[in-house]
Image (cartoon, coloured by chain):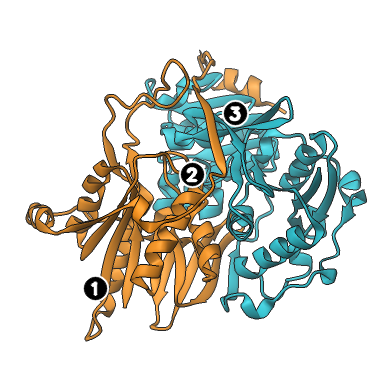
Amino acid sequence: MKTLVITERDGSDFRLGSRSAIGFAQSLPLSVVDTLCVADYRGENPTADSHAAVIAAAVRQCSYELVVAAATTYAKDVVGRAAGLCGGAMASDVIGHRFDGEQLLLERPMFAGAVTATVSLLGSPRFITVRASTYDPVDLSSADSLSSLDATTLRVDYSAVPAAQWKSVASRASQRPDVTEAKIVVSGGRAFKSSEDFERLVGGLADGLGGAAGSSRALVDAGITPNDLQVGQTGKIVAPDIYIALGISGAVQHLAGMKNSKTIIAVNTDPHAPIFSVADFGLVGDVYEVVPQLIAELNG
Amino acid sequence: MKILVTCKRVPDTDQKIRVKEDGSGIDDSNLAYVLNPFDAIAVEEALQIREEHDAGEEIRIVAVGVGIAEYEAELRTALAMGADRAILVENSNTMDPWAVANTIAAIVARESPDLVLMGKQAVDDDANQTGQFLAALLQWPQATFASKIEFGGLALQVARETDQGIEEIEVPLPAVVTADLRLNEPRYASLPSILKARKKEIEIIPYAELQLDISPQLDLLSMKSEISQRRCVMLEDVNSLMEIIRP
């Protein structure tokens, strides 16, 4: 099966999620995998419309049967549009797969993860975004050694691409790893009253453990944390070795983003908070008292 | 100026979703339904654009649903919030995102809106595809996951929520924009406007009348419930917690 993995980079290296998507693509039988990082070619005008046009041209001109990417906001935007240009056979956020004879069966979450559906794609080419945390990433050197499609050989009619214009992206300078890539994630919820408290306590504990800082929706809505920290159904989906939920009550939408973490630890003042129903370890307590003690222990 | 807003009927997210014993679908016998929360944000944004910019130029807002007759309730919600009129493409068969996108594209061809506003995803299937599919079908620019829209006549300035942070793009009209959580806080319809909305007409178009020939792309074979198997060990004190997380 001729497969194209749409990749993203962090600097010059493939992102962890892209390497997981490669891992998924390589696990399929008889799969011949090329990679394509459209940003390498379309850096100056990175709109979804132009990126999707490149992917659609690649699929048509090189006869790819399958397009795979990690389910990031980039792929949801760009690969979704490319699938729309190529017939609409797409499964998003795939968390498992198996074969029934020749037929590829895909598992994907619905209803904020309360339900797992088994689906199959009927049309061709097929487009699949995979939840990165589900599939083991290939290492950097084997990702680099894959053949990468030379997009300059593609005929893309940019005059037919809508004239949207990319203006800017406000990336925060952060020394911490991304929540989707860290082995330990410390997340804060409604208990935190200000950005300063969040940074001192959630950020402080994350730094002490060498992990990433995440947030529930409530804090992003309140302007206390930036959107790219949000873990949940509509934010980032994480599955680290250790997830520490501080002052997060555990709405279904938040659980959808973290319940597959290997070990979940929750601290909350309310012993009946739903977060404890998905946790392995729980401590009833006030994060403003508990977390400074943990940070002091780690630094001491 | 015309804004088309899509409205999907979804189970209220406050309920527990159960799968039928045979795994063929969800048990919908006692479920309450609402307008998809992201679509409600899209409706609200259309209303705000109208309120801010409707000086002289008439801005009309058309709510569109694609599905069973019961969709009328969610379209009435959009009307009560302030949409001018509503269209229901009535179809009792299950449709995948591709079929829905093609159906909305057919309505766009009839209505010629300048802007299509949609929720970025529906909270039932969580597919996050229909907006992107529609934009591709129409060959219109897309701005997904919008957290801020500035309307400037011929183009929109859109702030988008991405994994890397907030991205700003400019999209010429006509365009497809999908709404993220923080675009706005949808209003509650007042009782008088709910009563008024009951009298507004909903145009019903039988699906067959559109004469679309759309092959299904996604086959939903079965479902299962996900229930946490974890047993939470409650810790006595901070020291026991420290033992677990100490590197």
Q: Position of residue B15 (x, y in %)?
A: 32, 29
Image-based side of A193 in relation to A245, left or right: left
Tell me whether marks 3 and 2 sit on the same chain.
no
Above-or-below relation of B126 to A196: above
Depth check: A82 or B152 in front? Answer: A82
Quarter in which the N terminus of chain A is drawn: top right
Distance from Cα at disc 2 to Cα at disc 1: 34 Å
In the image, farthest residue toward the bottom: B56
Which label is found at residue B9? none
Mark 1 Cα within 10 Å, few/some/many (few <14, many 20+)? Answer: few
Residue at the (33%, 27%) spot, across then down: B28
Residue at the (52%, 71%) spot, across then down: B140
**Residue under label 3:** A260
Which label is found at residue B51? 1
Judged from the image, the secondary structure of the residue bearing numbered disc 2 is: loop
Q: Colour of chain A?
A: cyan
